[in-house]
Image (cartoon, rainbow, N blue to C red):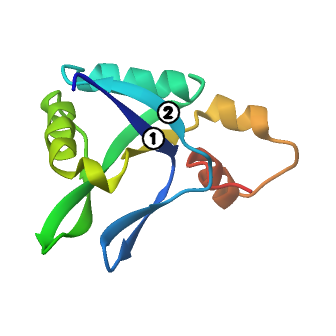
Amino acid sequence: MDNLSALVYCNGDMIPTYEGIAFEFLTDPKVITITKDMSHAALKKTIFDANGGYKTLINVFYHQPNHVSDGFVAYNCMKLKHDDDVGKIFFIYSEYSSKGLIKLNATFWCSPEEILAQLQKPITANEIIALMYNEYV
């Protein structure tokens, strides 16, 4: 198992549930391939490219399954920060592969130039902040 497919969701919300942490997303996921020896920087570049390469990637979180008891699995949110975090995903997946695909949440930020390009009407400061975090509707 040197390669795995992962679902990458963009700017999802992390919601506490009875199963731990769940991701709630407004967009369809992108499918990427990750490798066991992939660096953190390479993972971020792969996610950036899959998203079209036009926004700044801030953080990546892993929807991490954890055994609780008697086959019950809860989910935590693991922020990926280091090169060995990708290896941890492979290790965890080997334990819980029957629980579904790997799910990642990528947090993107829009630059001021990107926000200005999206403007079609005068907006408030709060709406500009919402645009920076892709929450503007």
Residue 85 x, y percent position in the rendering? 17, 36
Residue 129 x, y percent position in the rendering? 60, 53
Residue 25, above or below 2:
below
Measure the C-alpha gap from mark 2 to mark 1. 5 Å
Residue 65, above or below 38:
below
Give 41 or 125, whichever is nearer the viewer.
Answer: 41
Residue 94 x, y percent position in the rendering? 17, 42
Dot 2: what SS? strand
Is 97 displayed left or right of 30 in the figure? Answer: left
Is 32 displayed left or right of 86 in the figure? Answer: right
Counting other residues with Cα less than 10 Å from the Cα at mark 2, is it few (<14), some (14-19), or many (20 or more)?
Answer: some
* Residue shown at the point (44%, 42%) measured from the top left: 106
Q: Residue furthest right?
A: 121
Assign the C terminus to one quadrant of the image: bottom right
Residue contact at pointers 2 and 1, CB within 8 angstroms:
yes
* Residue shown at the point (31%, 47%) measured from the top left: 62
Q: Amino acid at mark 1?
A: Leu
Is 75 displayed left or right of 46 in the figure? Answer: left
Dot 1: what SS? strand
Q: Amino acid at mark 2?
A: Val
The residue carrying mark 2 is: 31
Residue 7 numbered mark, or none: 1
Residue 100 x, y percent position in the rendering? 36, 51
